[in-house]
Amino acid sequence: MKTDLSNRYDIEKLITSFYDKVKTDSTIGYIFNDVVKVNWQKHLPVMFNFWENALFYTGNYTGDTMNIHRHLNHITPLSKEHFKQWEKLFTETVDELFEGPNAELAKQRAVSISTVMQIKIVA
Ligand code: HEM
């Protein structure tokens, strides 16, 4: 039986699985692997903090997500298809691993941040 997302350990499991999908995805993988050549050892803990803060208000993420993606969009154009695929992979990963109010909240937050990002950056 699946349980709800309830602590940092669950977030680590979710986000690690999500980026495992991202890395091998034929629509968005190249942005992480070839364009930015992401240092995963550095990037994953930042993402754990981001999601812990987004769901549990821990205050341990203070980055400027919008500007980072605005900059990324200058290096390589981000399209609606890229965001759609990002959202699909995120939603799929949550549904595979968790079930409950926080799992629903995580999917809602992801889509709403992604929507704002697209409006500010792509549209
Ligand atoms: C087309 C969709 C997206 C692409 C291709 C993308 C790609 C990237 C890349 C390449 C980085 C930089 C990693 C590094 O510097 O090592 C990054 C950072 C990040 N992304 Fe995204 N991203 C996307 C959408 C999103 C969305 C929707 C969210 C939030 C819900 C998000 C949250 C973040 C965060 C929190 C960081 C770390 C920023 C920091 O260093 O403070 N991304 N993203």
Image (tube, rainbow, N blue to C red):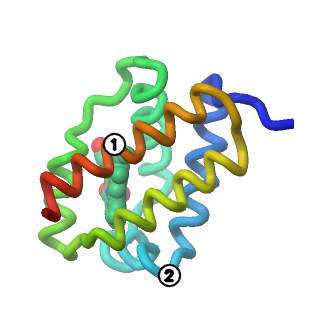
Q: Is residue 58 left or right of residue 64?
A: right
**Does residue 44 lie above or below 69 as drawn?**
above
Residue position for label 1: 112
Q: What residue do we see at 20% from left, 52% from top? A: 68
Which percent across, then down, holds residue 17?
A: 63, 54
Which image quadrant: the C terminus? Answer: bottom left
Check whether the beta carbons of the residues at disc 1 and disc 2 lie within 8 A of each other.
no
In the image, taking residue 22 as reference, residue 34 lies left or right, namely left
Label count reads: 2
Q: Amino acid at mark 2?
A: Ser
Dot placed on the residue nearer the N-terminal end, 1 or 2: 2
Indicate the amino acid at tag 1. Answer: Ser
Whole-Å distance between the Cαs marked 1 and 2?
Answer: 24 Å
Taking the spot 43% from the left edge, 49% from the top edge, the residue there is 42
* Badge 2 element: loop
Quadrant observed for ligand 1 in the rendered image: bottom left
Dot label at residue 26: 2
